[in-house]
Amino acid sequence: MLGFVASARRMVAVLATICVTFVSATAIAQITPTVSTSSAIDDSVTRILLEPRCGAGNDPKRVALIIGNGDYPELDWPKLANAANDLAQLCESFAKVGFRVFAIEHADVATLRQAAEDFGMAAQSAETALVYYSGHGFEYAGNNYLVPVDAPPLASKGELETLFLPMSVLTQAANRASGEALFFLDACRSLDPVVQLSDIDPDGQNGNVGNLGLLELDRSVVFYATAKGSPAFDEAPEGATISPFARAVSERVATPGLELSYFFRAVGQDVVQLTEGMDPSRQYPFPYGQLYEDFFFVPPTPIAEPAIGIDGLTGSFPPQSISPAFNQYLDSLTLDYLGITDEPLIVGALLKDFTADDVRQAAEAGNAVAQYLFGYMLEFGAGVKKDVPGAKKWLDLAAAQNHPAAMLELGYWIIQYDRSPGYQDRAVNLFQRSADTGFAKGNSFMGTLYWDGNFVPQDKQLALKLLRDAADKGHPYAIYAAGFYGDEFDRADGELRELIAKGNDEGHAWLCELYFFKDRAGEAAQNCLIASKAGFAQARAIWSEMKFLGNGVAVDHAVARHWMKLAVAQNELPASRRARILSIASGFPERN
């Protein structure tokens, strides 16, 4: 999800269409409820009706349970110094966006079970239920378990259900809500087992203890703080008093108009930046699951209608004041930067410090970059309410100013939504105009069209020239394509490794593809794994295939299925690759 390759994704899409706080039982006995209860309500319900400590949020339609387990016995489990700090910060943040928050920290197994039971009672009258867990966890025999602070480091298989909290207890509680169930798991998923089982056969059907696995849930999404096989840092950067995942979630949750998929990308982007330089690698959060409706923690702020209609391109807008800070930010979005950076990352970074209304005002003032960005935001509902027709009006305005990013985006819009006579010619004209300016994304896209002969006569020599021009500007896909199609393997290899050295994970993704399609996948196995962790769908499919077939790596069907499930859940995975990996997976057992 983090490695969202917008340019390649758009190519595929276009070508395809042309504290209510829980406390200990002893403490509860000393607290007088602030509300009265009828005889039909038992003591557990009384507990969840205590006065919240986490701010003003108290909407019974939105409930959240936050668990911060960090005070583990040092000899048994590593302590997590920031778990309690995470809980306090998240408690406030979720309350501010309307959640009625229940929170427990350093909970033993009895407290966890009681909390889950009480939370289920609150969830059954709610529309949205959210669970955030910070602590240790593991998987065995396809089941996930959370680790209470009184859990032993050694147990038998028969003791798992009683000494630990099965994750299913929490999922069943949250799924009593009538709408969405959201789960956040801020727990390490490194390869070292966090618990030893005294009576397992590692070579048997169920294998050994592993890290927290994928939860297969209906109308639910699980947001994992880190990828399979990697740690979730309790402290990053060094000296931080809150985990990077908790910090990013708490900061981004209040951003108006971030539909959940954009929220995930924004949080992931922040965590990657916060964990830059950490050992053994950066931390890559990712979501898994599906909701059937758009979800916002904070709905989009209504956007005021322009003072003058924007249907006619000859009209002028009244002057608008643009803050010096935002004007400086717009100036920093150079064509070189816009030409090699994915729009979701651009918008995610923008909304961290500014608002959609800042963009609108600058767009009305006639700033072409703001018009292009506002059009994109309206087209995809990023930070604003989705308005596909309205998006075109702003893209038209920016394209009329010959802004190459806007011309390219407007061409995409026409291919996607316009079926009036001559729409393909209009789109290709825009693509070509964008490329004629030397805009990297425009060159890359036109190069692909000329190579395949889509919408334009096939011209592979021109295609390679356009792709090389884009590659010289640092466009990751173009570097790959010039290397693959133009027989410049060594050059592409070196240029992609330069991107990697600069911290650009797209380098890993395209290097993985370059080696895979040259039948040398094993030489780029580490690149494929890193790109998979960073969220690139194609890399996940390739890595899965490698692990299924032993293509340059050791066979591991369980690992292969993990990455296969993640890959096929992503819309940007090409249909041909989806069919291939599903076909390969069907020939192997569900577990080793």
Image (cartoon, helix red, strand yellow):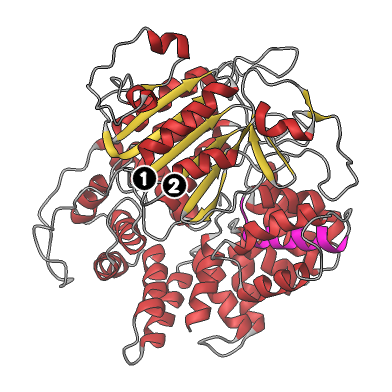
Please check the rendered image and state whether residue 540 is part of the magenta-colored stretch, yes or no. Answer: yes
- x and y percentages locating residue 524 in the rendered image: 81, 54
- x and y percentages locating residue 145 in the rendered image: 65, 35
* Amino acid type of the residue that numbered disc 1 sits on in the rendered structure: Thr
Q: Residue at point 69% right, 60% down?
A: 564
Which label belongs to residue 181? 2
Give the image quarter of residue 537. bottom right
Q: Is residue 447 left or right of residue 376?
A: right
Q: CA distance from mark 2 to mark 1?
A: 6 Å
SS class of the residue under badge 1? Answer: strand
Q: Residue at point 61% right, 71% down?
A: 574
SS class of the residue under badge 2? Answer: strand
The residue singled out by tag 1 in the image is: 128
Q: Is residue 535 left or right of residue 548?
A: left
Instruction: Write down the region rendered in magenta.
Output: 535-551
- x and y percentages locating residue 151 in the rendered image: 68, 21
* Amino acid type of the residue that numbered disc 2 sits on in the rendered structure: Ala
In the depicted structure, whether residue 69 falls above or below residue 272: above
Of 496 and 120, the residue lying toward us: 120
